[in-house]
Amino acid sequence: EEEKRLSYEQKLDICDHSIAQKLLEIAIEKKSNLIVSADVTTTQELLALAEKVGPHIVALKTHIDILIDFDSDNTILPLKDLATKYNFLLMEDRKFADIGNTQELQFAYGTYKISNWADFVTAQVIAGYDSLDCFRNVGVVAIIGMSSKGTLTDADYREDATKIALSHPNVFGGVAQNKVPNELLLFTPGINLADAGDGKGQQYNTPEHAFTQLETDFIIVGRGIYKSTDAEKSALTYKIAGWSAYEASL
Ligand code: 5BU
């Protein structure tokens, strides 16, 4: 008999990290596996988007360094209020990729002070196991494989990256375009219902592909939602598509 993917309830039993537990609980409560990638460049757009999509998402993914007007009082405080109001987590897609000491500084200092507000961050594992020790008070999602055309994350790299992700206590998940072991939560970007690519190397798949072929746990959608004329409606469409694909894959 073919083995079925694990449900979010089953994953709650084997994914111990506190952030993994929170994400799974929110997914079950909201019947959503959608993460919106808020790749907008002003605080006003960021907050307006969070307000619209908040009810439908488990997490909002940021690239905080693309904001032209970042201000911790005016950007982060209202964003955190919206996260509380609508019950979603903040995922900073920083893709740290340096030695531990430098990452520690990038994480806690500088303009963005990510350690003060992010619930979890993304990190490359290119610098090795010890480089991830600095992310003690958040969760880490390791970049195992990338969605872009020609990425260097080949099968050998992904195998080694997966070993680090599985063994490091700060890591509870991976970003990938392939299956990962059940003990990790899988996050899949490169999801779009309308387009196959963006002419800049991005490659898109459907939510159905991500759940059936990759057994993903969370889909990440950027332009498919924030570029649409009605972001709230699009978020609902992707939420329903993601949840149906998840249920069909059980
Ligand atoms: P899009 O507009 O849905 O293409 O945005 C995708 C987002 O996911 C964007 O913020 C990327 O930085 C992010 N991403 C990705 O697209 N592919 C990857 O492999 C990784 C992150 Br890792």
Image (cartoon, grey):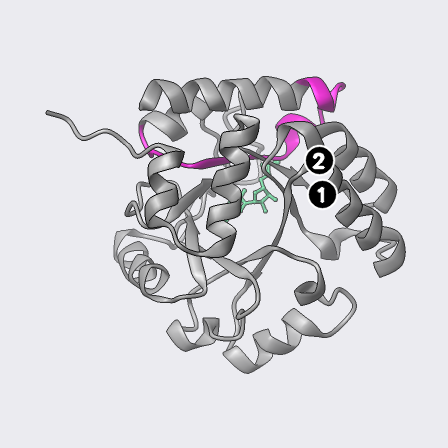
- The quadrant in which residue 192 appears is top right
Q: Toward the viewer: 246 or 213?
A: 246
The residue shown at (42%, 51%) is 174
Residue type at the position of mark 1: Ala
Q: Is residue 85 left or right of residue 166?
A: right
Count of numbered labels shown in the rendering: 2
Q: Which residue is mark 2?
A: 86
Q: Is residue 142 above or below residue 208?
A: below
Instruction: Magenta stretch: give its range.
Output: 213-233
**Percent position (x, y) of residue 47?**
81, 40
The residue shown at (45%, 28%) is 205
Q: Are marks 2 and 1 in contact (CB under 8 Å)?
A: yes
Q: Is residue 169 above or below residue 143?
A: below
Q: Which residue is mark 1?
A: 83
Membership of 216 in magenta stretch? yes
**Percent position (x, y) of residue 209?**
38, 25
The Cα–Cα distance between marks 2 and 1, rounded to whole angstroms, is 5 Å
Instruction: Name the quadrant where ligand 1 sits.
Output: top right
Q: Is residue 249 above or below residue 39?
A: above
The residue shown at (88%, 54%) is 69
The residue shown at (10%, 25%) is 1
Callout 2 crowding tier (Cα within 10 Å): few <14, some 14–19, many ≥20: some
Membership of 87 in magenta stretch? no
